[in-house]
Image (spheres, grey):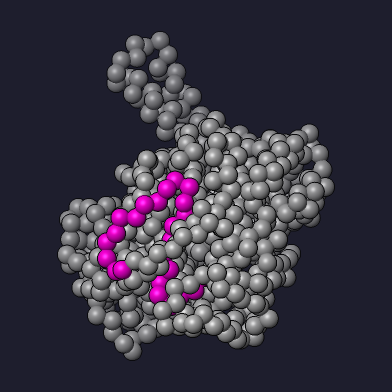
Amino acid sequence: MAIPQKGCRRMIKRITYGAPFDTEAVTGAYESWQGELPYFSQEEGRKFSYRMAEEDIVFGLGENVRGINKRGWIYESKCSDDPNHREDKRSLYGAHNFLIVDGKECFGVFFDYPGKLTFDIGYTDRNVMLIEAQTGDIDVYVIEGEGPEDIAKQFRGLVGRSYIPPKWAFGYGQSRWSYMNEDEIREVVKKHREAGIPLDSIYLDIDYMVKYKDFTVNEETFPDLAGFAKEMKEQGIHLVPIIDAGVKIEEGYDIYEEGMAGGYFCKEEDGSEFVAGVWPGRVHFPDMLNADARKWFGGKYKVLLDQGIEGFWNDMNEPAIFYSEKHLQEVFEQLEEFRGINLDNEASASLNRLVGGLSNNEEDYKLFYHEHKDGRVRHDKVHNLFGYNMTRAAGEAFEELEPNKRILMFSRSSYIGMHRYGGIWTGDNLSWWSHILLNLHMMPSLNMCGFLYTGADLGGFGADTTEELLMRWLELGIFTPLMRNHSAWGTRRQEVYRFTQTGSFQKIIALRYCLLPYLYSEYMKAALRDEMMFRPLSFVYAGDRFARRVEDQLMVGESIMIAPVYEQNAKGRYVYLPERMKLVRFRGPEDRKEEVLEKGHHYVDIALDEVVFFIRPDHLVPMSKGGSCVEKVDFDHLGLLGFVEKEGSYELYDDDGYSRDYESPSHYTQITVDAEGRISSGGEGSRKEFYLI
Ligand code: MIG
């Protein structure tokens, strides 16, 4: 355990090796430190090793597999389209190269490097952390501070303020690959409304387009998108279309033709446009690292904004490649060699390898180039920046096109820096119990790296879900800023009204809307102050040896601790309380039970349809009465749920939820509740009324 050292705030050193590529992850200029790299020994500015003490915990790496404590496995930063998030994977869709070591020594380290990085955190040698880059061109930032929380905050200050979505994006979203037409969506909305299940958004997956062409709308299935978006909005629903990274090659398709005319697509060494295969078949990739191409591509979102669309998700932007034209030709030729031969074990394995190696092949990432402001660069060297810059293209365009309005944007692939332009969802998980826990593990890791607007595909994307799995997952999902139920083509339908216990689902989702004043306030404070909304227990209860070991509970904002159930047939679970807390148990907004539990280990019964969370002493949770969509939620008359022993207090943030005016002091209200239950509130936002619940 690191002894918190006072008085060493803002201790960031940048150590530069070689000539690093400017990723623009860090905002503003930062002088390089001329001294030695602290903590690590290094070779060639490419390999960095740190000897870990037995008690060290390693936090970080954002979106990745395994626990909150990253020790014991080897990870890679290599944005990959991989729908099998098994424990033995090394990378997922994002590259988030920030770590905090907390133990004998305590420091944070950010490896600002756009290519592949390996983080061997006790894999080869249990006590050694070895970070290896491909080349010796890297910026390493070392951060010291008063403990992990302070270090994370300083890091966030370095990389800039996190993206802020519109308030409606904190509502419940229903998605499916794909809702095929207007009527199908009308039906989904109707079913939710009939069952009283709150809902704010419906997602349009790839089939709303014409032949998977970005910024087109299929007129047979969505004959009047503008009219339909308006109709939906009248029911409190926002339509959120997907945008893919690849642009279909097709004469007469305006985006393709403009991209060709402007020279905006990625090219091969000989100057011809690189051809990859993705959903539409043959595509070109817009050169997201080229400022002109970015401006052009970002401007295209206007096509949909003009039809009343207010939110988007950017997909396939690792970028995912089904095949490259070049490699495909080679494979076709090599296939000839298999014709007519006896496919024995070896031959059939190599046939499988040949065909299986077509998608997301590392060699293909070496075939194309970017025209970056600092010169031409081969894609594989800057691979992890592609999704980041696609989302930046959109984010920068929104600032120009909609300067006074927030637009929902989240991406699949990302790099630190992208958190300024959008959120992320955690990609193609599966309807597996272990992925509920994975969702929980990622939340604080992502927050550390700046990704606040984030969440998983609730219920699981791939594989068939079950009623129980979905319900348990939603009991975690009601706390995550992005709360979206999404599932893959061909899997069991998982809109909540399709199951038997629709009423229980309704109650769980309704509770989310009651918690919105708290969750929104916590989100906004975290974003505006460079703080984490989701923290591991050990960040808050430093020095508590049990808190340091907890991998399945989280602090959500300043008042709440959560301990979700993530096991099939569980009737409850063990929970560790690092201090005396109030347990609250909800079966819907109206049915609440409370009990005070002492510090220590407890077995807590949690029935399938119950939401349980814990309130810290002298903390408050402002709650609304709920609503069918965010717009219908009254944020001005709030119930205060609290655990008041001496005096409970809470700093509430609220704003209009649409404009980009975040700074006004009128957004804050200070609330206190004394031991007799007297409420007082002050601050410029004090027009709000409060009552005890
Ligand atoms: O190759 O658009 O992660 O959410 O439903 C699959 C179809 C492409 C991957 C995304 C997923 C989405 C799906 N997409």
| Magenta segment includes 319 | no
**Which one is nearer the viewer's eye here, 515 or 1?**
515
Horizontal relation, residue 212 to residue 32: left or right: right
Query: Which residue is pictured at 41% across the width and 40% down the height?
Result: 432
Horizontal relation, residue 588 to residue 34: left or right: right
Query: Which residue is pictured at 74% across the width and 64% down the height?
Result: 401
Residue 465: % across, % down: 48, 37
Quarter of image, res 411 = bottom right
Query: Which residue is pictured at 70% across the width and 61% down the height?
Result: 631
Residue 358: % across, % down: 46, 33
Residue 542 visible in the shown view: yes
Vertical side of 622 occupied by 223: above or below = above
**Which one is nearer the viewer's eye here, 521 or 560?**
560
Residue 578: % across, % down: 31, 69
Horizontal relation, residue 216 to residue 159: left or right: right
Quarter placement of the C terminus: bottom right
Residues drawn in magenta: 598-622
Residue at the farthest front position: 676
Horizontal relation, residue 237 to residue 329: left or right: right
| Magenta segment includes 617 | yes
Residue at the farthest bottom position: 7
Residue 421 visible in the shown view: no
Vertical side of 385 occupied by 258: above or below = above
Residue 186: % across, % down: 73, 40
